[in-house]
Image (cartoon, helix red, strand yellow):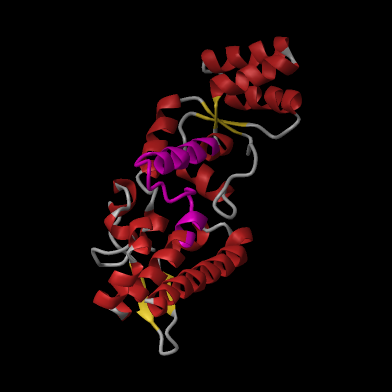
């Protein structure tokens, strides 16, 4: 994009409206990429955004269904004797409800023990795309949790793919594989007044957008687009 801006006069003379359309799209689309989870366009790093997404998912999955080892360690910090009691009940595979009662008394929050991780733990606890705090679910089988995480990891980048358009120009040509693997799902339209409209039609995108930043992103995208176009046309007129 920086190279294109430096050669703006040549590009405008050669491609005319197509260039300005793509310039507008790139500017606004870049802002939208930044507002869609996982954060960042990650032009320089092909994996940073994916790793960020995996980290967020791992945190949310753990809050929705905490591993038994981590939970027992937390109990030990509060009451070592009763924490060992809970661990003993679970190890001997006795009545899990008895372990849950002791854990609830110690932890000060309703605790439920499950053998395997259920997707419902995660989906029901999410609000605005995140799990805010520990839900009280504790999972004994760690492998089931890791298996679920891997399935969710495959969705990383899906919301961002809704800003990609079916062209060799723009972000689609440079987006990392963790985004492009979902296809180019965005739409772009040039309106009669000369403005550019891009739309992310994926239902998942609305959940993955940071709602608190949406007005800011829209404003900044418009300002950046108008400012860059102004400078490009100003350069052309000076020639």
Query: Where is residue 44 shown, x and y percent of the image?
Result: 37, 43
Q: Which residues are magenta?
A: 31-59
Name the residue rendered at 36%, 75% in the picture.
Answer: 20
Q: Nearer the viewer, residue 226 or 230?
A: 230
Tell me if 138 is positioned left or right of 108 in this view.
Answer: left
With respect to residue 140, does 211 lie above or below? below
Residue 118 seen in this snapshot: no
With respect to residue 38, does 231 lie above or below? below
Query: Where is residue 223 shown, x and y percent of the image?
Result: 55, 70
Name the residue rendered at 55%, 19% in the picture.
Answer: 69
With respect to residue 133, does 214 lie above or below? below
Residue 97 seen in this snapshot: yes
Number of labels in the image equals 0
With respect to residue 218, does 136 lie above or below? above
Q: Residue furthest bottom?
A: 192
Q: Nearer the viewer, residue 8 or 112?
A: 8
Name the residue rendered at 58%, 25% in the picture.
Answer: 96
Query: Where is residue 227 shown, x and y percent of the image?
Result: 51, 70
Tell me if 204 is positioned left or right of 136 in this view.
Answer: left
Residue 144 falls in image quadrant: top left
Tell me if 104 is positioned left or right of 66 in this view.
Answer: right
Name the residue rendered at 48%, 51% in the picture.
Answer: 37
Quadrant position of the C terminus in the picture = bottom left
Query: Is-magenta flag for residue 237?
Result: no
Query: Is-magenta flag for residue 35?
Result: yes
């Amino acid at each position: 994009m920086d190279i294109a801006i430096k050669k703006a006069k040549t590009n405008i003379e050669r491609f005319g409206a197509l260039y300005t359309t793509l310039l507008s799209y790139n500017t606004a689309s870049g802002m939208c990429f930044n507002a869609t989870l996982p954060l960042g366009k990650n032009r320089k790093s092909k994996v940073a955004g994916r790793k960020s997404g995996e980290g967020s998912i791992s945190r949310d999955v753990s809050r929705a269904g905490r591993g038994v080892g981590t939970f027992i360690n937390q109990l030990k910090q509060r009451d070592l004797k009763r924490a060992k009691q809970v661990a003993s009940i679970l190890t001997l595979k006795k009545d899990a409800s008895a372990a849950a009662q002791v854990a609830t008394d110690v932890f000060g929050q309703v605790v439920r023990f499950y053998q395997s991780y259920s997707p419902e733990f995660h989906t029901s606890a999410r609000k605005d795309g995140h799990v805010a705090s520990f839900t009280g679910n504790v999972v004994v089988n760690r492998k089931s949790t890791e298996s679920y995480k891997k399935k969710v990891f495959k969705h990383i980048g899906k919301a961002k793919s809704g800003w990609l358009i079916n062209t060799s120009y723009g972000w689609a040509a440079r987006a990392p594989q963790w985004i492009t693997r979902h296809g180019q799902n965005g739409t772009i339209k040039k309106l009669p007044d000369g403005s550019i409209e891009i739309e992310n039609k994926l239902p998942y995108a609305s959940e993955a957008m940071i709602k608190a930043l949406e007005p800011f992103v829209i404003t900044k995208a418009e300002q950046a687009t108008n400012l860059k176009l102004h400078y490009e046309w100003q350069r052309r007129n000076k020639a």
